[in-house]
């Protein structure tokens, strides 16, 4: 990483800091703190806010999980975030994304017809939101016709949130993944 990782225990063990570490550990259980956490914990208050936001995006959304994970994987590909891809591609497959769909996302050829209608809308939204920030009115109308206002918001915050994550990961080279090749996960 371009800066050292923060220690896995607080250097200033105040009740507030200990509580923050505890909340982040609870979200990660049964795993230990991950490199992303250790990068963020240089400022425990920011790490705490990040943990709360991303935890809600991951666990409190009514947007279909497979489509959310597909969007996250597409953000990773678009932004060259190898660590994000490596973490989320297996989750996407377990959530129900077809392997062939993930392969065309990784290859940048998803417009070729291997994706369903919902998947195509999510991928197009993710691409527009990530690359040009502006989302075309026509696409937004199709999203609103398909999902509730809450779900459109949840897709939007998922894409925006994981753009934040990928930019943080790549800028600091968390896990020293920059320049490595994104690969499809092993078959489940």
Image (cartoon, grey):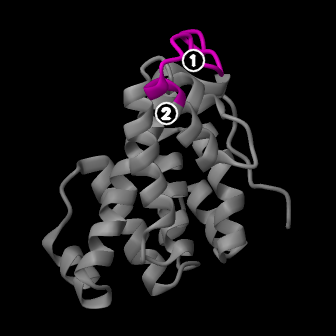
Q: Which residues are magenta?
A: 1-18
| Residue drawn at x 18%, y 67% as measured from the top left | 136
When the figure is inspected, residue 176 is found, relative to residue 134, above or below; the finding is above
Q: CA distance from mark 1 to mark 2?
A: 9 Å
Which is more N-terminal, label 2 or label 1? 1
Is there CB contact under 8 Å for labels 1 and 2? yes
Position in image of residue 105 (x %, y %): 56, 61
When the figure is inspected, residue 7 is found, relative to residue 143, above or below; the finding is above
Which residue is identified by label 1? 10
Q: How many marks?
A: 2
Residue 179 visible, this orientation: no
| Residue 129 figure quarter | bottom left
> Does the stretch in magenta take in 16?
yes
| Residue drawn at x 59%, y 24% as measured from the top left | 38
Which residue is identified by label 2? 20
Position in image of residue 16 (x %, y %): 43, 27
């Amino acid at each position: 990483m371009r800066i050292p990782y923060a220690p896995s225990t607080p250097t200033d063990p105040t009740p507030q800091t200990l509580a923050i570490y505890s909340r982040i550990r609870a979200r990660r259980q049964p795993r230990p703190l991950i490199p992303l956490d250790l990068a963020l914990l240089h400022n425990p208050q920011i790490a705490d806010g990040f943990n709360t936001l991303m935890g809600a995006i991951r666990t409190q959304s009514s947007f279909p999980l497979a489509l959310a994970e597909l969007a996250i994987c597409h953000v990773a590909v678009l932004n060259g975030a190898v660590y994000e891809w490596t973490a989320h591609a297996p989750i996407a497959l377990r959530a129900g994304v077809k392997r062939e769909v993930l392969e065309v996302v990784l290859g940048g050829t998803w417009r070729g017809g291997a994706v369903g209608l919902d998947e195509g809308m999510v991928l197009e939204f993710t691409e527009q939101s990530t690359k040009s920030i502006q989302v075309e009115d026509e696409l937004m109308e199709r999203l609103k016709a398909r999902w509730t206002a809450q779900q459109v918001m949840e897709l939007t915050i998922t894409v925006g949130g994981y753009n934040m994550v990928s930019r943080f990961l790549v800028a600091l080279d968390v896990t020293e993944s920059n320049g490595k090749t994104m690969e499809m996960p092993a078959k489940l």
